[in-house]
Amino acid sequence: MKRIDYLANPTRFMRLAAVLTPWMGWATVLLAAVGLYLAFFVAPPDYQQGESVRIMYVHVPTSWMALFCYVSMAVAAATGLIWKHPVADLVAKCTAPVGAAFCFLALLTGSLWGKPMWGTYWVWDARLTSMLILLFLYLGYIALVNAFDDPARGAKASSILVLVGVVNVPIIKFSVDWWNTLHQPASVIKMGGPSIHPTMLWPLLLMALAFTTYYVWVLMVRVRGEIIANKIRVLRLKQVHG
């Protein structure tokens, strides 16, 4: 709780972000470079899927990140609602476009992967449908948080939407176990450890780390921009009313 209170101060957050931002940027570049090299030049083709399996190294990490970003939004939204932390509301607001982009990429790469594997770009199975709903939740949040002239009202209304929509996250995660879908069961995060070969697992994990550091990098930049914009807005209001 003390750490949350510490970061709730915009000035302290700005100092922390100034330190972390360049490190996250360089980590993203390095991890993505190594991950892509291993994915395209070291990892073998799949014995069934052939070279098309390389889409996995983008599709799977973006799917993970779409869920991770939404959970991050939900945590930030709950923190903003309960403890009235202004930075938490900004974290939720700045996460939404990044999460929406990850979700869109997951759906796009999934459809490109599905065509050679399933013979179609899209099927209305549980995993795809729930991921599409997640994209709509992201877009609905973005529209709602910007629909109010008062940022506090927009943050409150959109936070409630996020917390209601978080029920979709376990549905996405366990849809392949609960229903008969075209998606294969989990092969990385499961009881008993990963069942994927290390030559495929390592580039997959490196790409996941690269997308994670990218998210933190962009989040820091966007939140810092929002804090600066808020300070400018306050100064202008003081000039108008002064």
Image (cartoon, helix red, strand yellow):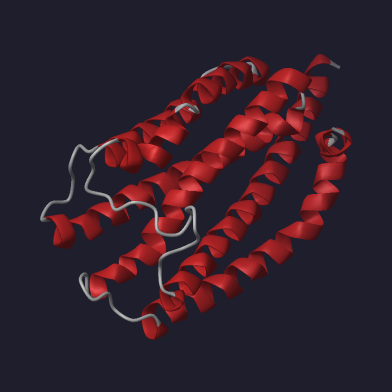
- The picture quadrant where one finds residue 84 is top right
Instruction: Determine whether, in the image, residue 142 is placed left or right of residue 10.
Output: left
* Image spot of residue 142 (x, y percent): 49, 30
Vertical placement of 105 versus 45: above or below? above
Residue 21, located in which quarter of the rendered image? bottom right
Q: Which residue is depicted at the point 29% across and 69% down? A: 53
Q: Quadrant of the C terminus?
A: top right
Q: Which residue shows up at 81% across the image and 59% down it? A: 19
> Of all residues shown, which one is farthest toward the bottom?
41
Residue 139: x and y in percent read 42, 32
| Residue located 76% across and 58% down the image | 20
- Side of 181 where 163 appears, left or right: right
- Using the image as rendered, state which of residue 194 and residue 100 is in the foreground: 194
- Residue 184 lies, in percent from the top left, at 29, 53
125 or 140: nearer the viewer: 125
Rendered position, 153 above or below 51: above
Q: Can residue 93 be seen in this view?
A: no
Residue 45 is situated, as x and y percent measured from the top left of the image, at: 28, 78
